[in-house]
Image: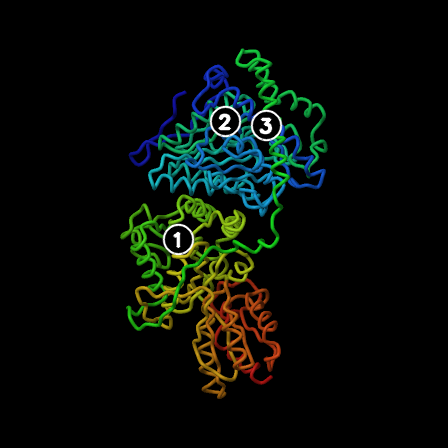
Amino acid sequence: MAQNQTSRGGSTRRRAKTVTPSEKRNQASPSHPVAHYPGHAEVYRLMTLTRLIDDEAPNFLRKALGWSYHAPCAGHEAIQLALGCSFRASHDYLFPYYRDLATCLAAGMTPTEIIWNGLSKANDVAGGGRHMSNHFAKPSIHVQNVSSCVSNHSQHAAGLARAVKHYGSDAVVFASFGESSASEGYVFEAINGASREQLPVVFVMQDNGYGIGVPKREQSANARIAENFSGIANLKIEYCDGRDVADCFRAMAEAIAFAQSGEGCAIVYADCVRIGSHSNSDDHKQYRSQEELDAARERDPLPIFRETLLNEGHMSKDELAAVEAQVKAEFDQAVIDGMAAEPADPTTVLEHLLPPAFDAVEEASDEGPTCTMREGINRAMKGEFRANPDTFMWGQDMASGTKEGIFKVSDGMQAEFGEARVFNAPIAENYIVGTANGFSRFDPKIRVVIEGAEFADYIWPAFDQVIELSHEYWRTNGQFSPNVVVRLASGGNIGGGLYHSQNIEGILANIPGIRVVQPAFADDAAGLFRTAIRSQGVTFFLEPKFLYNQPRTRTNVPDDFVVPFGSARLRREGTDLSIVSYGTGVHHAIAAANKAEEEDGLSVEVLDLRSINPLDMDSIVKTVNKTNRVLVAHEDKLFGGFGGEVASQIVDRCFDQLDAPVARVGQDYIPTPFARNLEAAMQLNADRVLKAIRDLASY
């Protein structure tokens, strides 16, 4: 079938290519195996083994031994075996979903490893029992550990494929998911981005007609959901009968060849059948008729394949029986080994929350140029990119000619380091954050910096990917750390109104597994950035946009100045009371403290947290024990803001030393208005802090 081509900008762009059912039936049969086909006996062994494990999994649950989540793959085996057998262990990359039992067995996982996962054993190679059963993974051979947020690993696949392409590998990245989860917007973002960048990704959509209990007709106007993507350039769509082994292998081979050609990415859309319920917590008899269930049984790929092997003379009854006996013995031994393994160890549950941070030692110095905060961050970024060629940065509107970001923080970055390392991303926050997760998987030496959104307020469309970043290291039992710095312009006082003025540190602080920092001066901004990019793990680097070009942030910025995580800095000595703050609040606190001393004779100490998570409680306790009165000041909303957590911990650790209740001051609990006079009426400022100082001092 000829491909339609259009010309744009002088280059040839390929429209999505499809193969029709009539064409594909003439291209392959069980007697004409295609590339990656391991032979009839091996495919039958894998298919039979899969079905045996799949059928027995609910019995473990009924015996209260485990497998409390089980999504059967019966009816999907043909496409899953084609996918798993096409995957080259430790070379390609595979993102399975929770129904991909046959895929993972074919990819190289053993039956024992499958059972360890199902029973949440300590030996579970996916994550030591930290993740749900039926979430199969083996990171050591590149079978990735994915979450329960259906199909959002499509973003990770696109990001990883970007790294594959950049580093010149011939690997292919596979992302598997059900047809109904393709309704998610992030699937479109992943396919749109991968096609635009012509990345070597094969997206495998397994269509069984239902998203849990929601029929496909309620998901899409197109019966074949892949047709929703048919207008995308540089995308090849292969349709196949997901119950026909030969047709599935054919489709996979075609898709892989296209992905490896460099012309773009591919979708393999497999028409499967769901024989069982969605999972053990679903009863499909509530929404499927008996006639439909009977018809599904008749389309079962296992007996169809067995009959084909017999009828076409590929295997005899005795040979099939021998395979079945082998599978039964293999399964029985796997059960013995799986049951004998130790359960997950509760004493290890707190391990692997955060990977190691760079061992930063802060040393005061008057060397280096005097910079504003914006200049300090820019200087630090350029220094780190010069030192490490495996550093990359992308985001929205940050590499457009000489514009280089709306705040010019990335000024000169692309000009110096090139488009391969510093580049614009689509206006799609989920894609920006998700591809950073995926890209960092290619090699632990890689460091990714992203502007997660042009303003912190716009990070919400990517929040599932924020959560993904937070528990990758913990969920994989320390096997994978996304090494990503997420830069976000935070806070108000700029007349930005809604979606340009919010603070999100209180929300981020509630997410275990990430670091959150917010500097107030240029040297700390540079030092915290250097520590973040040199560390393993995820750091949210919140940049108070009001302070970018403020003269009050100007300090000397030494070339190699670093700031440890969880280390506060004393900004002003005092004896009567303490202010604990961070970011813009530090400057309001200093201004208010100076005025309180001048007008009221009060000696006010100001502690700059710099790091929100981890939090330097030792320095907080020290200043509270010194002055016995403490005010927590921050730019964020007072109700539900991070100051409440700081105040609570102070009470827990310093109650006997307090001469007054812990006081707090912050923004009013309303959305940020646009008019400057309305914004000024609700924002934190020095006058509000001064009033709080006087109230606390008079208690």
Label 2 Cα neighbours within 10 Å, binned few <14 / some 14-19 / many ≥20: many
Question: Which residue bears the numbered disc 3?
Answer: 49
Which residue reaches farthest left?
416
Give whichever of 340, 595 is nearer the camera. 340
Q: Residue 263, percent across and down?
A: 36, 32
Q: Residue 144, percent across and down?
A: 49, 41
Give whichever of 639, 508 is nearer the camera. 508
Question: Secondary structure under badge 3?
Answer: helix
On screen, 232 above or below 325?
below
Q: Residue 486, percent across and down?
A: 44, 55
* Amino acid tagged 2: Ala
Residue at 50% in and 86% down? 602
- Label 3 close to label 2 by CB (< 8 Å): no
Q: Give the mark toward the camera: 1 or 3.
A: 3
Question: Secondary structure under badge 1?
Answer: strand
On screen, 404 above or below 687?
above
- Label 2 close to label 1 by CB (< 8 Å): no
Query: How much space separates mark 2 and mark 1, taking CA atoms?
Result: 36 Å
Query: How much space separates mark 1 and mark 3, taking CA atoms?
Result: 44 Å
* Amino acid tagged 3: Leu
Q: Give the mark toward the camera: 2 or 1.
A: 2
* Amino acid tagged 1: Val
Give whichever of 491, 321 is nearer the camera. 321
The part of the image, by quadrant, that contains residue 373 is: bottom left
